[in-house]
Amino acid sequence: MSIDLKTMFDLSGRVCVVTGGGRGIGKSIATALAAHGATVVITGRTQTTLDAAAEEISHAGGKVDAITADVSSEDDVERLARAVEKRHGVAKVLVNNAGVNAIYKRVEDTTLAEWNEIIATNLTGVFLTCRAFGRGMLTAGSGSIVTISSIGGRVGLGKTGPYCASKGGVELFTRSLAIDWAPKGVRVNTVAPAYVETDLTAGLSEHPVLSERITQRTPMRRFAHPDEIAGAVVYLASDASLYVTGQTIGVDGGWTAA
């Protein structure tokens, strides 16, 4: 198959859905996809957050829509998939970015409710969105699914047992799905960042002790910026990665190389 090297990152005409697209990494990903020509649908649980992000993307010239949904709810995800197809047609790209890491404690002190909350969003939510949007991709015979994993899905991190379990599950779910769907033209990959500067990690990046530990453990000696995650997603969404499936791209400043 021949690829036009000049246009291989062009996403014009493609509908891209980004969960958790209203802030942080998700907003950077949505902005980058729109900048490469995609029609981007951002989704999350808070309409005001989505509207603010959509306004920024639109102001920059991007085509964007905002639809509320909770990825841990089967009904919400199915409703979202129907709404996207009705408004824009079949989504050719799904970015599973929505995720939580609501606790920092040892497993013996973790409640079942805390475990369930993290697994429901980070792992079950990925299953639900892949199933809902994958149907259209399989029928169309093409598509790309990118899930934002974590270094916590590849190496252990202290006091984050449920989070690491959810991201490890995402990694192997991705590989299994990639095998099942490759013959149908649907690619499935993950991007695994280390610590990224967002409002959710502000407590870590501003902590005098924990921030120093993280930066010293990271060969590049800093947190990532959300925009630095977006490039890998654009690559996996585009024709530049047509022969890539079942893989994890580490965007971790060298964390997993050390």
Image (cartoon, rainbow, N blue to C red):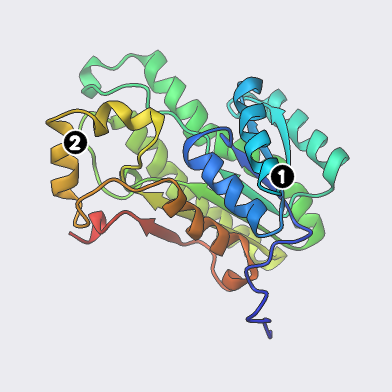
Give the residue at x 53% y 40%. 26
Image quadrant where one finds the C terminus: bottom left
Identity of the amino acid at label 1? Phe
Quarter occupied by residue 108: top left
Where does the image place residue 216, in percent across and percent down from the top left? 13, 47
Mark 1 vs mark 2: in front: 2
Disc 2 is placed on an element classified as helix
| Placement of the N terminus among the 4 image quadrants | bottom right
Mark closer to the chain start, 1 or 2: 1
Viewer-proximal residue, 176 or 194?
Answer: 194
Give above or below for 184 relative to 41: below
The residue drawn where x is 40% and y is 29% is 199
Image check: 137 left or right of 126? right
155 left or right, relative to 19: left
Helix, strand or loop at disc 1?
helix
Looking at the rendered structure, which numbered label has been put on residue 211? 2
Decide: is 188 above or below 53: below
**Amino acid identity at mark 2:** Ser
- Closer-to-camera residue (59/178): 59
For the residue pair 124 and 191, the one nearer the viewer reads as 191
Can you give x and y, in whole percent of width and height, for residue 234 in the image? 57, 59
* Location of mark 1 (residue): 133
In whole angstroms, how far apart are the C-alphas of marks 1 and 2? 38 Å
Left or right position of 151 against 236:
left
